[in-house]
Amino acid sequence: MMLKKDPIVPPASTAGPQPDAVQLPKGRLIALKLAFALFFVLIAGRLVEVQILEAAKYQALARRQYEQTHALPAVRGAIYDRYGNVLVSNSMHISFAADPVMVGEHADRVAGRFSRVFGKPRSFYLAKLRSTTASGSLRRFVWLERRVHPELGQHLEPSGLSGIVLVDEAKRLYHYDDVAGTLVGFTDIDNKGISGLELQFEEYLRGKDGSIVMLRDGLGRPRPSVDYPRKEPRDGYHLTLTIDLAYQAIVEEELKRGVAVNKADAGLAVMLNPKTGEILALANVPGLNPNKLSSYDVSSARNRVVTDVFEPGSVFKAVTASAAYEHHLVSPEKRFYAERGKYKAPLAGSKFRLITDSHAYDWLTFQEAIEVSSNIVMAKVGPTIGAERLYRQARDFGFGIPTGVDLPGEVRGRLKKPFEWSGTTLQTLAYGYEVAVTPLQIASAYAAVANSGVLMKPYVVARVQNNEGEVILEQRPQRIRRVISSETATLLTRAFEGVVERGTALDARIEGVCVAGKTGTARQVINGKYGEGHYTASFVGYFPAADPQVVCLVMLDKPRARGYYGGLTSAPVFRAIAERIVNTTGRFTKTPQPREHSQPENGISVPDVRTLQVMIATKILEGQELKGQMIGTGDIVVRQIPDPGKRLEAGDVVQLVLNGTEANVAGGRAAVPDVRGMSLRRAINRLVVSNFDVQVRGSGVVVEQVPAAGQNVHAGATIHLVCEPRTLLSAALY
Amino acid sequence: MTRTQRNHIDLPTLIVVLTLMVLSLGVVYSASATWAMEKFGESNRLLNLHALRVLLGLVVLFVGMTIDYKRFKKLTKPVVIAAVVLLGVTLVLGGEVKGAARWLRFGGLSLQPSEFAKFALLFHLCTLISTKGEAIRDLKKGFLPMMIWIGSVAGLVLVQPNFSTGGMIILISMVMLFLSRARFLHLAATVAAALPLLVGIALTHPHVMQRISSFINGTSSTGRPSYQLLQGIIGFGNGGLFGVGLGESKQRDFFLPESYGDFVFSIVGEEYGFIGTMFFLALFLVLMLRGFKIAKFARDNFGRLLALGISSAITLYALVNAGVTLGVLPTTGLPMPFVSYGGSSLLFTSFAVGVLLNISAQTDMHPRAAKIPEQTSAAPPHEQKTVRVY
């Protein structure tokens, strides 16, 4: 039998078992198919649009959603002194930020917990957590607490605090508080340099932040990702300064004392190596503690050594004398009539101008006139030199021109050109008026004299190095020009020695070292007039006179206690500094060298480290191959055994008695030490060492303390101090 | 009747559906892993549930395949009555989901009666159209009775309120009426009457208005689409031409809400790219074309209408879902058939495909090689026209 298949018969055409009487409308079926086809095309077309034509746009949108770039902060560079002592480094702190959207309804709980740990009111945190953008939506990032001690963060149980971000942040740590504070400067909360070297070398110190891309989900939480590249940060470069920490500490300490003793408004000092232009120390009083910025007036952040100008007064006579000697117009022995202290200098017509000296002399040689600082003689020499030569000499010394030092905010001062001069300028300029100079310009000019007449460019940063020690930038001593001949320089030095030996600066004399220098006492212009009793008292000197290693300028603003003469006020400060430097290092006879420097055969002279911070004192002793042994607690050396100047062998021990005595800590309670009569600085040091908090009213010397000395209070309690300006007696005791 | 399956089923249809089901496992896993991990602590929690439903769907599909579709003709009326009752019960007792009473729960099982009602109505409309014949053109005898059924089912779903499913029920019903010989006049009048009603409902329900306005704004150049829609479109775009790769979706990480549900197509687009979305679209196109072909070969008008209705309904769901996720239609909560996570839809759709396959097996599309003489004797005489043996 054969099997054969029937051709397919459309059911409608053949009567089925249940024949459908009616056919379905064919046209409508086609219409339906068309509609579906259109729908398919619509969807496919949209897919082409979204997935092909606009894919890049949506991919970017997606990436912006799920990728989050976190900065890997670079560590800011450290700052070292010339011997590698760390002046500035970083300490790690933690900061808390929040995503208010993620915190959401937990804002109350979060605020409560932060409030408990950090002691600020809940409303403080709630306000932050509910802060909105301009468009009215919640912010996605607010700081809750910045730069808190890592330990505090542990009190915050991290569980259940969704939306809280913990950030490790480096905080600048200034190892010696206000030592070199105005020089080094400080950074803002974002670690950006805003003053001093921190500002000037921001580009080098800052480094370059790296980044890491993290994936996150729609709730803002990070998700693990493996194949995202990490861009490593480049740490900031380190600065090595020309500053000598020991000199800096001494200069700062002595200047502070000088300002206090003389009841001056302020003071400044700058010390240079005349042969190289290296700045060895630079101090401003009042100073600045970059670690505790809020407690200082912002204006004290200024480094007035370069930012402020003064009328120099008699220290400017070096320029007049230089011009006179350089052009062989005057010999040191030439005699002038000093008009018995009152000289009516003739002006145009029948007018005259009265020029006075502080002491009345009949006849003076030119050198004697320098030694006793006779304005009259200088005024008489002025016309002999002539405007053009005097101007050129001043300009050659660098007055009226920025020194080019690597410090921010340097001003050029003002040296009028001869055509701008009035009828009296030639005479008044000759003894240091009608000219505005910066302290650094003065110090630099004297350094040129000390350096046999060659002016060097002052600088403070010797090297910029990276983490690997490679030198990125190096500054070498830079000769600017020969200002005067070495013969002139010798004549000037001889005169300046006379100033110290016989003249106006007897107080600058030190044992065994020949100091050359010049005093200056300039009336200050107050409200457009030269005021009575407002003086700038300065002394600039260098030693040893035969082969000067150190130039140091000390300026006091409005000294009141011991008179106003530079010779009586600033010169003793200079002497104190010089004496201690001589005692401390013995380096001054040679060009400063690293500490490998060998010592004289007959033992080591014990340096004077009293009143210095322990760390600095220890470093100074190490530099002399001596060992420091601390007695008691505290951070300031009050006494040293043996005394300064005694001779010891290398490796011998110097005992350092510290300001604090053993705190009587028992059961978390401690006896309050007696700080009455101490300087505020000492008192604070003393109390902080024993873990007390300090609140201060007034300034100067502590006259009252609450709680009283000897009372047992819990550790960390706040001690209130009432201070009064120090009297001469207490200042001297200090 | 002993045998209903005379010839082979339409294999392309089965393969398409099986492909969709298998792919859905991967897609649902990708789309739900993050959410499941967060919610249940195991990334494959939803995958497991979905796999279970796919298995159940296969069983249901097989059941639908083995039952002679013609037997439904007598059952559609009681079933649609049952569906209406069930919808009424749901309205009274139903579990609330997002403010709508859509679910009925029996112990651990939950069921969406609207999904059931959708197919019950579709089947009954097929019965009505195929039996009424020319009477369909008569308003009182043909058109109105159908409108009453459509109205009661759709109305009960709309008041849940579930506008998406209600709207789809109306849409599919209109397609069926359109395919019948119903008068255009009647259809047009129905649409004219229904429109103000729908607008009224929309106006009284804020979330409907919101979606519509969001849609209108989203398509304008200045407006911003809703968050979910934007995230859905970002998913498609992020996939680009070739996709980011299996399991690499970023949108599923809480950017795209309900990524495994109604917006699962976006995850398809993200992971498999344009290639993937076009492939899925092609599968549905094939499913529709096979359904239309089965209809063409169907032995009777009931089967023809059923085949057209089932394939149209599934395709329409897929297209509307894709249109929603792509922002060319207002956002509605409709799943993508077979692909989206979700039980009720999968089960009823699987059953419907089973019925479609049964219809195909009773056509001459894929005739069995006639070899067994016994079959001839076994076959009931009235079915001899299908396979003739000499």
Image (cartoon, grey):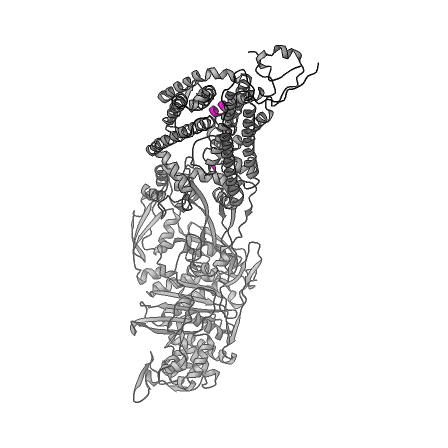
- Along the viewing direction, whichever of B122 and A212 lies nearer the viewer: B122
Spot occupied by residue A507 in the image (x, y as percentages of width and height) = 39, 71
- Tag count: 0
Location of the N terminus of chain A (image quadrant): top right
Is the magenta region chiefly helix, strand or loop? loop
| Any part of residue A307 in sight | yes
**Residue A720, above or below A403:** above
In x, y percent, where is residue A715?
36, 43
Whether B129 is among the magenta residues is no
Camera-side residue of B280 and A213 = B280
Measured as percent of width and height from the top left, residue A460 is found at 49, 64
**Magenta includes B338?**
yes
Residue interval drawn in magenta:
B325-348
Residue A386 vs residue B122, the one in the foreground: B122
Percent across and percent down for residue A400 are 43, 74
Residue A734 seen:
no
- Between residues B213 and A12, which one lies in front from this camera angle? A12
Quarter occupied by the C terminus of chain A: bottom left
Q: Is residue A714 above or below residue A192?
A: above
Q: Can you tell which quarter of the image residue B375 is in?
A: top right
Query: Is A278 situated left or right of B367 in this image?
Result: left
**Quadrant in the rendering for residue B191:** top left
Residue most extreme to the right: A1
